[in-house]
Amino acid sequence: MSLGYAEKLSYIEDVGKVGMAEFFDSSRVLEEKIEQLAKMIEKSKHLVVFTGAGISTSCGIPDFRGPKGIWTLQREGKPLPEASLPFHRAMPGMTHMALVQLERAGILKFVISQNVDGLHLRSGIPREKLAELHGNSFMETCPSCGVEYMRDFEVETIGLKETSRRCSNVKCGAKLKDTVLDWEDALPPKEMDPAEKHCQIADIVLCLGTSLQITPACNLPLKCLRGGGKIVIVNLQKTPKDKKASLVIHGFVDKVIAGVMDLLNLQIPPYIRIDLFQTILSKSLSADERYVNWNIRVTSVHGLSAPLPFIKSIEVSFSDNHKYKEAIIIKEPFQLKRRTGRTETFKIFLKLNFSDGCGCLYTQITTPFDFEASRECFKHDKDVIFQKLRDMAVQGSGSGQTEVIERKVTLSPKTEITVHAIVTNVKAFDYHSSNGDVKAVKLQKESMNGSGTSRKRSRKRKPRS
C-alpha cells in the first residue's frame, strides 16, 4: 500500500493484529502443495481470487501487518519503510500478470481485491471482472453519471470526498469524488454485490497475500462453502480463516503462483505500461499582424491543471536554421512562450526527460511550426494504437516508443492539440524451476510471444469459454 494512503487514513487505536510471525513450508511440502493447487485450479469451473497487500510487496509497496509492515513499525515506534518506487510508478508483479493470463484462458472468473494500489486494473484485469472493495488511489468517479476516471497520478483525497476535477461529460460536469474508503466508510454495493455473487457460486476462492482480518471483506471467501466450494489460502502468516480452508500454503505468493502457472503450461505475460500526454501549440498574431506570438505546452490528458508525474523536465530546441536559443523547463507547467515572424517555418524538438520508475530516460518528439498552414484533424482507435505499441515492445523495441492518437485543431485562436501515447515500462518475468526463484527480467523476443511450451508438459491448455 501507499505510505501516503496510510497517512491519510483517520486515526484509530486498534488496527488488529500486527507484526505476526511468518511461516514457511519446507521445499518438499511447498512443491506438493503447489501441485495440489494446480490440480484444483485445472478442475475448477468458477475460480475467484481474493487478494491483499501481500501480492504487492514484491512490487515495492509495503504491506501493513507483516514484520516490516506500516502498522507494525508504527506500533513499535520505528521509522516507516521506504517505497522503492514512487507509488504512481509501481508496476504489477508476477502474480498480477499470472491472474491476467488465467482470466484470458477462461479459468479465472472474478478478482476481489482489498488493495488500493490499482495494480489489477493496470495489469489488464477487465473492470467488469474486478471488485476493488476499498477503492483505488488512482480512480475518480462521478457521483452523478457514474463514469470512472483512471488517473496516472495519485488522487489527493480519500474518504469519498470531492476532488478538484469535474466530470468531462458535457451533459454532466459534476464534481468528481475519490473512491478510497476511510475507516468509517461502508463497502460500496457496486463492488460488494458482485463480489458476494461470485463467491457464492465459486468452487474455489483462492486467497492470496491477505491476513483476512478486515471485516466484512474477510468473510466473503466463506460464502463459497455453502455451495460446496473450497477455500485456498496462500499467505506467510496464519489467518483466522485457516481452519475453514481446504489448503493453506505458507510461502511467497509469487513463487507459489509461478509454480502453478508452470504446471498448467501457461505463460505469464509481460507488463507493458503505456502513458498518455498531450502537446498544445497555440498561435496568435500580434496587433500589427507582423509577428506570431506562440506558446507550446506539454500537459496531462486529464486536464490542464492535472499533474504530469512521469515527466521530470523538458528540453526544447529548434531546427538548425532557426535562431532561437534552447530552453530547459524543469517544473510544471511545462510551457514555453516565444514570438516569431509571421512567415517563418521551423521545427520544435521536445526532449521529454522521465521521472524515476520509468523504463527509459527520455523520448523525443517533433512539432512543425507554420502559422499559415493548417494541419489535419484525426482520431485513431486508441486500442489499435495501444496494441501496436505493445507489439513493438514485445518485439524488442522496449520503452520509449511513441505514437500519436489524436489531433484536434481550432482556428480562433489557432491551436493544435496532439495526444501522444508512449511505452514507459516493459517488465517480463522468469521462473526457474530448479530453485523456485522468481524475478523480473529484461524482455526477450522469443519467450514473450505467448506461444512457448512448458518445461514440464508439452500439451497446451485450451481457453475456456
Image (cartoon, rainbow, N blue to C red):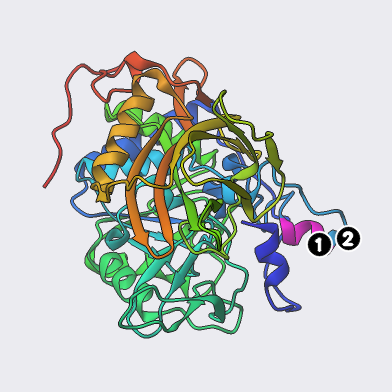
Instruction: Judge the density around disc 2: few (<14), some (14-19), many (≥20) Cα neighbours within 10 Å.
Output: few
Residue 355 picture location, percent across and down = 64, 40
Indicate the position of residue 441 as horizontal and vertical percent values: 50, 22
Q: Let me know if residue 328 is in the magenta part.
A: no
Decide: is 458 above or below 349: above
Left or right: 54 in relation to 50: right
Q: Which residues are magenta?
A: 70-75
* Residue located 40% across and 52% down the image: 416
Q: Main secondary structure of the magenta part?
A: helix
Q: How many marks?
A: 2
Q: Three-letter amino acid code at disc 1?
A: Gln
- Please say whether residue 73 is one of the residues in the magenta stretch: yes
- Residue at image position (52%, 31%) is 364
Residue at the spot 70% in from the left edge and 58% down from the top edge: 3
Q: Is residue 220 visible?
A: yes
Residue 286 lies, with reference to residue 319, above or below; the image says below
Q: Which mark is residue 74?
A: 1
Secondary structure beneath label 2: loop
* Local crowd size for mark 1, using a 10 Å CA cut-off: few (<14), some (14–19), many (≥20): some
The circle drawn on residue 77 is 2
Q: Which circle marks residue 123 in the picture? A: none
Question: Is there CB contact under 8 Å for labels 1 and 2?
Answer: yes
Q: Nearer the viewer, residue 31 or 214?
A: 214
